[in-house]
Image: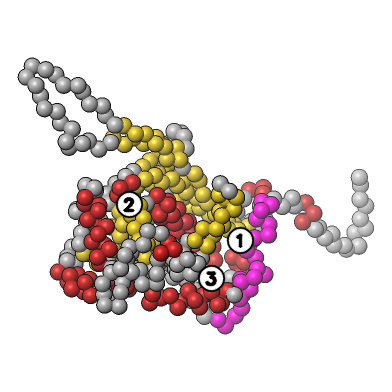
């Protein structure tokens, strides 16, 4: 087609380039794209503000530290088969008769599988937001996701430990300091079933009686909630003995006593109330808090010995960060309008020795009012 233009005629042709654009955005990301108008981000476009970025407090990530590290090699599948050799009976040695060979013994070998699965999350940002924002939101997004993934990894491990641990309820502490009868189930727990040094010593004695090795030398590890740590250090027995048993503590440890080292974490589970589950006779109500109605918050602290559990990875990949900077989208992002950050990890966990793990369940009467206030706020 020929177009004849008069030399004395000026004209302007305006092209709408967007009519040629076939924007490709993952369907599940379209509604969650971070833009300049996103709720919670509009404040970042304002002038005359404090540009210091205030970060939320972060939990201590401790639950994978003392697990046995198990690696599945590349292209070796998504589960690993583990083997355990049963304990030998120290009284099983046979008295020998002269010239006669006794019957042989069999090795008790147990195998079990630990499966792994992959988990991840990501964020997407527009170029306009990243260009006009007062903060480096891409960097902060990467940091936030990295922490989120690490906390998720830790929580998966902790929840697996609690679900498979032997359970020990703390005895109620009477007004005169003596201990009452130990509860055997949640409905028998009272608000005075606080953590005490006597309970710690009892669990340590049970681990020693089962010949469970220590985690650090002869010492065991207890993951403890800060509320229960508060109760423990106010225990007169703790104050009496701790000063003479607090040497050789490592970084991050709160204390050491009776062959037990303490590490605090706010990620310790606190259960309260009831839940409904599918039972053999239909839906059943299970009390997960203390007392007959589950109204007493229960803390699930963990004490463990050496080789109690293992955490599994594939090809030693760990938690992997995945960043797509502006300009990395190719034909799917021809105008460099989108960037994303994310991460993923492989996770699996297996109990290697059931006798080396205890869920020490207790209350914290001192902090009960906090949970009452939460209930009122949510009502």
> Disc 1 designates what residue?
125
Q: Is residue 82 above or below residue 136?
A: above
Q: Determine which quarter of the picture holds residue 79.
A: top left
> x, y percentage for residue 38?
65, 68
Q: Residue at x 11, y 17 (%)?
A: 100
Compare residues 268 and 331 and report the one nearer the observer: 268
Residue tagged by mark 3?
A: 135
Q: Secondary structure at mark 2?
A: strand
**Residue 237 painted magenta:** no
**Prevailing SS of the magenta stretch:** loop
Residue ID for mark 2: 357
For marks 1 and 2, the one nearer the N-term is: 1
Real-space Cα separation, disc 2 to disc 3, in angstroms: 45 Å
**Left or right: where 168 falls relative to 135:** left
Comparing labels 2 and 3, the label whose residue is closer to the camera: 2
The answer to whether 157 appears left or right of 332 in the picture is left
Mark 3 neighbour class, 10 Å CA radius: few under 14, some 14 to 19, many 20 or more? some
In the rendered image, the residue lying farthest to the left is 98
**Residue at image coords 84%, 59%:** 13
Identify the mark nearer the N-term, 1 or 3. Answer: 1
Q: Which region of the structure is painted magenta?
A: 25-49
């Amino acid at each position: 087609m020929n177009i004849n233009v008069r030399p004395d005629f000026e004209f302007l042709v305006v092209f709408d380039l967007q009519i040629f654009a076939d924007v490709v955005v993952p369907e599940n990301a379209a509604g969650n794209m971070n833009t300049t108008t996103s709720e919670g981000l509009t404040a970042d476009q304002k002038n005359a503000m404090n540009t210091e970025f205030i970060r939320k407090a972060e939990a201590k990530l401790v639950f994978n530290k003392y697990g046995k590290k198990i690696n599945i090699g590349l292209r070796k599948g998504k589960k690993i088969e583990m083997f355990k050799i049963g304990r030998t009976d120290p009284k099983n040695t046979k008295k020998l008769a002269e010239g006669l060979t006794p019957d042989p013994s069999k090795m008790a070998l147990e195998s079990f599988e630990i499966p792994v699965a992959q988990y991840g999350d990501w964020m997407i940002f527009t170029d306009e937001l990243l260009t006009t924002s007062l903060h480096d939101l891409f960097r902060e997004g990467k940091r936030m996701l990295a922490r989120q993934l690490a906390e998720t990894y830790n929580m998966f491990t902790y929840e697996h430990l609690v679900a498979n641990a032997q359970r020990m309820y703390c005895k109620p502490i009477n007004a005169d300091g003596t201990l009452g009868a130990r509860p055997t189930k949640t409905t028998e727990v009272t608000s005075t079933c606080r953590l005490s040094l006597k309970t710690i010593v009892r669990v340590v004695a049970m681990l020693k009686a089962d010949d469970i090795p220590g985690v650090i030398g002869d010492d065991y590890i207890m993951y403890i909630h800060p509320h229960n740590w508060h109760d423990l250090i106010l225990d007169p027995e703790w104050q009496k003995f701790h000063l003479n048993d607090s040497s050789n503590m490592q970084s991050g440890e709160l204390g050491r006593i009776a062959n037990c080292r303490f590490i605090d974490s706010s990620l310790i589970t606190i259960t309260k109330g009831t839940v409904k589950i599918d039972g053999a006779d239909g839906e059943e109500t299970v009390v997960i808090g203390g007392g007959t109605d589950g109204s007493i918050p229960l803390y699930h602290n963990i004490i463990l010995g050496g080789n109690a559990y293992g955490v599994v990875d594939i090809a030693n990949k760990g938690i992997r960060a995945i960043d797509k900077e502006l300009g990395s989208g190719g034909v799917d992002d021809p105008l460099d309008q989108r960037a994303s950050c994310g991460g993923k990890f492989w996770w699996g966990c297996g109990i290697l020795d059931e006798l080396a793990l205890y869920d020490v369940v207790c209350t914290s009467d001192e902090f009960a009012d906090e949970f009452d206030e939460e209930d009122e706020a949510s009502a």
